[in-house]
Image: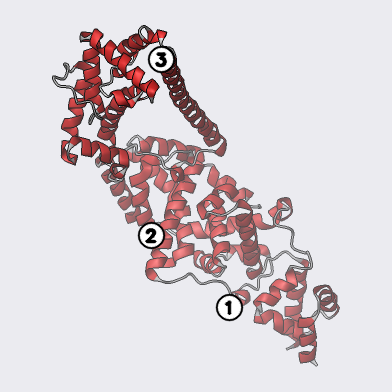
């Protein structure tokens, strides 16, 4: 889908990442640090979207397993991102099971979030997108949509890789990501649909008339 | 009035709803609904109209979503990772490296090579497996043909009994000098096979004994029973393996009944076949004769 820019940016590092992983598998500590620094931001963002404030702890668990099983891994840089995301996701699901807390399925904060984004232009909406708010928005999505969006946009996986991490068919993941992004766009007031524009006008008229 | 319209609106089929909505854009009812953020309603409003591009029509919404995705990714990835996270990861890496096993077996879930590469590798393995299996099965088939052919030939022709059978028994199949006349012609081929089985089991046992489950299999149980206890298997096996290659002839015959251990019988038979050819020939002849009677 339309994550060309982001995907390209993330994938710029894939060559470097692949080389670093290969050297780390041979025992190179510096290379492992390089791989960590390339992978960790996306991995942490993914975990923040699933487990919230416990993301650092879960990421730490995940890296323990990644370091332990590094010798088993086969693949390139992109593959390493998918492999690490799978491990991190398993740790996150374990964590949630232990905590017995499900991430909020969409709908509850919907009203607040919808009202929170009365931006006139896309630029305004996107510029003001803070980490906390972005995460809150994503966590407001249904679980499958949130995970699909996180894997594709934040971790930067392609469709088949995201589907493999989630254990679903690529088509299902693509649809979930698409719906999630649509919903986020709507909540940010940048739906881009004619109808949305019409109601924006409507809301202003309403405000004036009242 | 407004309530009434709202109710109608909810019940109206979607196309009608859409036209009606466009006709009364800006009314207070419409606004109230929108601000209340009615989830299902919102979805119904958007979907059937077809204003949303199909998810599969990627080109259409690429331009629309790219800025959003870039902004989302930037925002979510922006948070500073705590420095102790990296230290912990490095410590884990050092610990894993120190504990050895740097190249553990790659499980399926660890293989993230591109699909084409994986597919190319799998058939190679598969082909090897098929070839190996066909060779193994083919070998069994060929062996079976040989044994059946020679025994029927021996049993069928009286004149050939003195010449073909003893030579076959003495050279190719030492077990042919079977000490059990009642067993018939098919029996001799079993014994060397059994000996080899024991040998093979012994060899395999060394590799498998670490795995508790495999030892539950019948073959292992039989081996353990033959050895007289799980802890004696090693000794038993070393005896067997040595016996098949360089064991001197057994002093006593194991009787005219069924032999307890194939390997020792095989050794017996070999010794007899080489040392007492006449005897073995006589035995062989007798065996075949009885086989015919059976």
| Protein chain holding label 1 | A
Q: Which residue occupies 69% across, 66% down?
A: A191
Mark drawn on residue A58: 2
- The image position of residue B87, as x and y in percent, is 31, 51
Q: In 3D space, how far apart are the residues under numbered discs 1 and 2 (Cα atoms)? A: 29 Å
Q: Nearer the viewer, mark 1 or mark 2?
A: 2
Residue placed under numbered mark 1 in the picture:
A112
Q: In 3D space, how far apart are the residues under numbered discs 3 and 2 (Cα atoms)? A: 76 Å
Q: Residue furthest front?
A: B293
Circle 3 packing at 10 Å, graded few (<14), some (14-19), many (20+), is many
Q: Which residue occupies 61% across, 58% down?
A: A177
Q: Nearer the viewer, mark 1 or mark 3?
A: 3
Numbered label tally: 3
Relative to residue B36, is residue B23 drawn left or right? right
Q: Which residue occupies 43% across, 62% down?
A: A93
- The image position of residue B44, as x and y in percent, is 72, 73
Residue placed under numbered mark 3 in the picture:
B154
């Amino acid at each position: 889908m339309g994550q060309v820019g982001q995907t390209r940016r993330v994938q710029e590092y894939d060559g470097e990442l692949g080389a670093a992983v290969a050297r780390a598998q041979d025992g190179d500590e510096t290379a492992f640090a390089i791989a960590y620094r390339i992978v960790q931001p996306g991995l942490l963002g993914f975990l923040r979207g699933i487990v919230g404030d416990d993301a650092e702890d879960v990421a730490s668990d995940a890296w323990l397993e990644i370091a332990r099983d590094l010798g088993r891994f086969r693949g390139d840089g992109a593959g390493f991102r998918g492999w690490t995301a799978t491990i991190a996701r398993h740790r996150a699901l374990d964590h949630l099971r232990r905590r017995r807390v499900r991430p909020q399925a969409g709908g509850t904060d919907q009203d607040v979030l919808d009202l929170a984004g009365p931006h006139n232009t896309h630029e305004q909406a996107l510029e003001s997108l803070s980490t906390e708010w972005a995460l809150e928005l994503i966590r407001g999505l249904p679980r499958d949509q949130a995970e699909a969006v996180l894997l594709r946009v934040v971790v930067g996986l392609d469709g088949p890789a995201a589907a493999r991490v989630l254990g679903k068919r690529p088509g299902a993941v693509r649809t979930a990501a698409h719906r999630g992004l649509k919903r986020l766009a709507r909540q940010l007031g940048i739906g881009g649909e004619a109808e949305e524009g019409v109601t924006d006008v409507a809301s202003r008229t309403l405000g004036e008339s009242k | 009035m407004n309530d009434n319209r709202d109710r109608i609106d909810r019940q109206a089929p979607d196309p009608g709803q859409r036209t009606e909505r466009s006709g009364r854009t800006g009314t207070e009812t419409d606004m109230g609904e929108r601000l209340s953020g009615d989830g299902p309603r919102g979805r119904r409003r958007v979907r059937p109209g077809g204003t949303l591009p199909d998810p599969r029509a990627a080109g259409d919404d690429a331009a629309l979503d790219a800025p959003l995705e870039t902004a989302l990714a930037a925002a979510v990835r922006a948070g500073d990772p705590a420095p102790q996270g990296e230290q912990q990861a490095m410590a884990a890496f050092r610990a894993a490296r120190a504990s050895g096993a740097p190249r553990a077996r790659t499980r399926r879930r660890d293989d993230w090579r591109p699909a084409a590469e994986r597919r190319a590798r799998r058939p190679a393995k598969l082909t090897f497996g098929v070839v190996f299996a066909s060779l193994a099965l083919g070998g069994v088939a060929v062996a079976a043909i040989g044994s059946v052919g020679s025994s029927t030939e021996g049993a069928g022709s009286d004149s050939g009994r003195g010449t073909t059978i003893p030579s076959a028994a003495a050279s190719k199949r030492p077990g042919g000098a079977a000490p059990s006349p009642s067993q018939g012609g098919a029996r001799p081929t079993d014994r060397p096979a059994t000996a080899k089985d024991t040998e093979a089991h012994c060899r395999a046992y060394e590799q498998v004994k670490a795995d508790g489950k495999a030892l539950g299999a019948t073959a292992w149980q039989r081996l353990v029973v033959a050895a007289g206890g799980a802890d004696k298997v090693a000794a038993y096996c070393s005896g067997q393996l040595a016996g098949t290659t360089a064991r001197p002839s057994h002093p006593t015959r194991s009787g005219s009944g069924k032999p307890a251990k194939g390997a020792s019988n095989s050794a017996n038979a070999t010794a007899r076949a080489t040392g007492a050819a006449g005897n073995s020939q006589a035995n062989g002849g007798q065996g075949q004769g009885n086989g015919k009677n059976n």
